[in-house]
Amino acid sequence: MSVTGSAPPAPVPPVLPGGDGAPSAHRCGGAPRQVAELHLPARRRTDGVAVLVHGGFWRPGAADGSLAYDRRLEDHVAADLLAAGVPVWLVDYRAVGDGGGWPATLEDAATALDLLVDVAPAAGLDAGRAVVVGHSAGGHLAAWAASRHRLPGGAPGAGPRLRPLAVVSQAGVLDLAAAHADDLGRGAVLELLGGAPGDVPERYATASPAALAPCGVPVLCLTGDLDDVVPPDQADRYAAAARAAGDDVRVELVPGEDHQAHLDPRSRCWALARAEVLARLGA
């Protein structure tokens, strides 16, 4: 396994099932979570890449300390993609209370995605063929990443080097103003942006995917009808705004599945996400 970047060294990534046994970790900054990992499949079927962005309401972990909200949340679905022959770029970012919040969390996500442009060629990959898949808060960051080219100069994440081929939002928080109004995550949006829409309107305008439409790439919004963490209306609100702006957006409401189903390779939610990735990458 190889580790690249500035000190301190990135943690050695685990070898995931279906991988080639030599994942690499790449520093995106000096903080522990400023890391991205490249996992290559044992049998590659595409030179494209699936970029996976974890969720957790932009927080570092469960309130009771039982679970860290970091890139390891994506290991099971990453392994499923590797088994299907798809390279995986697993990204992380500083969370609120752990060096993140406005603008650091957004800047970290942008840096991690752009770093793939530098890392991909040595691995024989095409960073121009990247499908970004994000769960919950990661769904927010995935959809936001596709809209970075619309950001004004000087805004966090402006001037992207990587433009996604497509986006899959898995129960993503896609309309931050509505998410704040509905108190999703018990104040999670307020913590991320440091204020309500009336207090920091420019932050909502540059951080909310719904406010940045059109992104210009196909977006699949997946949501379970039993999801009481990020309700399906988040996908509906985003889709309405994006379609009105001319975007290609599909919404799939999956019966009988909840918020965590997206991280279970056996679920229907994941089957739909996986199929979209394989189709977009021709794998």
Image (cartoon, helix red, strand yellow):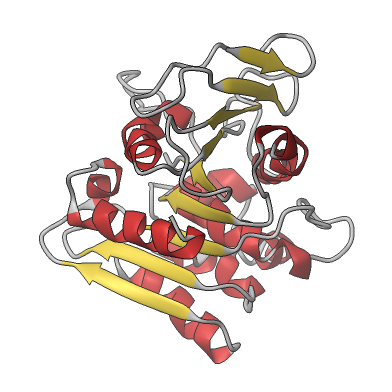
Residue 37 placed where, x, y %? Answer: 57, 28
Residue 73 picture quarter: top left
**Residue extending furthest toward the left:** 256
Residue 63 picture quarter: top left
Q: Residue at x 40, y 23 (%)?
A: 68
**Residue extending furthest toward the right:** 153
Q: Residue 180: tell me if it is visible.
A: no
Residue 8 placed where, x, y %? Answer: 72, 9
Q: Is residue 24 above or below residue 213?
A: above
Q: Is residue 38 above or below residue 81?
A: above
Q: Residue at x 54, y 21 (%)?
A: 23
Label total for image:
0
Q: Residue at x 75, y 44 (%)?
A: 117
| The C terminus sits in image quarter | bottom left
> Would residue 231 appear left or right of 279 to someone viewing this image?
left
> Would residue 267 appear left or right of 93 to someone viewing this image?
left
Residue 162 placed where, x, y %? Answer: 72, 54
> Would residue 107 appear left or right of 132 to someone viewing this image?
right
Residue 250 placed where, x, y %? Answer: 39, 77
Choose between 12 and 102: the one closer to the eye: 12
> Would residue 248 appear left or right of 200 to someone viewing this image?
left
